[in-house]
Every structure is written in structure tokens, then in C-alpha cells.
Amino acid sequence: MLIGLLYSRIRRDEKLLLQELRDRGHEVAKIDVRKQRFGLTDAPDDLADCDVVVDRCLATSRSLYATKFCEAYGIPVVNSADTAETCADKVQNSLALAGAGVPTPATDVAFTKESAMESIEAFGYPCVLKPVVGSWGRLMAKIDSRSAAEAILEHKATLGHYEHKVFYVQEFVDKPGRDIRVVATDGEPIAAMVRSSDHWLTNAAKGAETAEFELDAEAEQLVKDASDAVGGGLLGIDLMETGDSYTVHEVNHTVEFKALNDAVETDVPAKVVDWLETKAGAKQEVVA
């Protein structure tokens, strides 16, 4: 099979995937989106014969547009453009989860500093202010006082880009010093880990300690429901424990899995490639 890989930088995650694909004898087309040109009708030569394309773009903008072009050319791409668009924007992410009845933190969206302050005061302190687009915990703020809120809102309002003028305010979930990252394919969990830290942000990218986590039946169902809510695919689903239950924090569409692979006994890249083979095989059956 010919597997296309859209990328702008080959990280350890991509190296793990590439090694697994090559070990199985698959041909891989590495497509650097920084050098690629996408026309309106005909697929570029690097893409045209791919049985499936895997989006591993770092930049959200590149991911959103490259997947749209792949679909326009009739080339299967994971994740889909719709899934990418839903997951890349925290507002759309939250709306999709809430619309599907998936428990997720209470959230307000406001468009002025004044209305954002009203939301913050209504949630009480602490609460959380997040950028609508972003990852790795960047530009997120835990707000502990009105004076801190005023300073952060003023700062965001002067940053210039319109996204900073969309104020995404969320309740602070008092999780037990950890959250849960699940990597799943079309709602089926591959593996899960807890990410623990003394800091309120528990991202592995920020140095959180990781350990394997065994999902119970409730968590497995939430993973399935959250995946369905955003359109399915290869996803990273983040859960937080709330007493004896869970809330789904967000769903990630270009999920990193190197930390998970180190933390669990499961061979994560092998499971991902198992799933990719089914996607590529489906195209081959249609062509045949």
C-alpha cells in the first residue's frame, strides 16, 4: 500500500509511524506541506496514487487546508477535514461534545472584555481562560482574582489577531492532580495514560509524569461518544476525573503519542498502522 504522510517537521511520533509502516513493507510518500502546491482540480503527483493520507501537520492552518484538498481530490485522509476543523477550534470542540450529550466543563464564550469579565465573575475564582486555537497548554491562564482577570483580558485585547478577541472562559475543574489521555481509532481505545503534575496544567509537553491507565466501562463509553461527536478518526481524547465520574476536556485531531508509547506496554504505532491498513484497504476495495 502507498501511505501518504503530510508533515512540516518529522518528530519522534512521525518517526515511529514511518518505521512501523516500512517494517511492514508499505511504501510511504513523505509530503512536506511547506514545499507542496495544491491546485483546485488535479492532485499533486506525490498525492495522486496514495491509498490513504495521514495528516501530521504541526500548523493548524496547514492541517485544515491540506485535508480539504485531499478530500476534494477523492483521496482518503485521516483525519477528515470536518474532524480537523471541529477539533482545532475549542469552541467547535465544546459545542460538538455538548451537542452529543458528552459531559464537558461548563464554558462561556464572550466577544468583549466587559462580557468576558461577567462570565469570569459568574464562574468565580479560580476559572480558566483559553485561546480558541492552540495546543500544548500554551496561552492558557488560571485566573485567581479580578485584578488578574483584568490584566489578562487587557493583554489579549491588544494582541491584534481576531482569535484573541474571542474569550473562551471555562470553569476550573478540581482534578486530582492529573488527567487522562486516551488515543483511540474511531472510538476504540488503543491505550491510555494518566499525566500527573503539581502544576494545574498536566500536559506531557510541560513535563507531567506519565503512567499507564486502565479505562473502566464508563471511560470507554465516553471515549466512543466523544469520538463520534467530532467525526471519528485517530484522536487523542482528554478526560478529567470528577469524583466518581469523568468529564471530557477536549479532543485532539493531530494527536502526539510518543509519551503514551513510552508509558504503556501496548505498541501504539503498531495499533495505529493496523487501523491505517483498514482505511487504505477500503480504498483498494472500492477501486477494484
Image (spheres, helix red, strand yellow):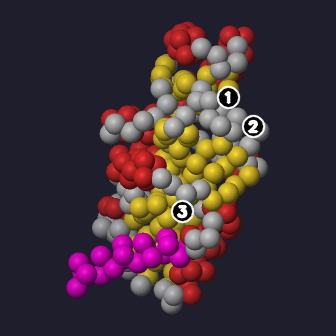
Magenta-colored segment: predominant secondary structure: helix
Frontmost residue, 235 versus 194: 194
Q: What element carries label 2?
A: loop
Q: Tell me: residue 20, above or below residue 89.
A: below
> Which one is closest to the eye, mark 2 or mark 1?
2
Q: In which quarter of the image is the C terminus?
A: bottom left
Q: Is mark 3 on a helix, strand or loop?
A: strand
How far apart are the alpha carbons under marks 2 and 1? 12 Å
Give the magenta range: 269-288
The kind of residue tagged 1 is Ala
Q: Could you say where residue 254 lies in the image, as x and y percent from the top left?
A: 53, 56
How far apart are the alpha carbons under marks 2 and 3? 24 Å
Label 3 belongs to which residue? 191
The kind of residue tagged 3 is Ala
Q: What element carries label 1?
A: strand
Label 1 belongs to which residue? 141
Frontmost residue, 118 versus 209: 209
Q: Residue furthest bottom?
A: 25
Numbered circle sitting on residue 199: 2
Of label 2 and label 3, which has the lower sequence position? 3
Q: Could you say where residue 188 lies in the image, as x and y percent from the top left?
A: 41, 61
Q: Could you say where residue 33 lies in the image, as x and y percent from the top left?
A: 54, 63
Q: Is-magenta flag for residue 24? A: no
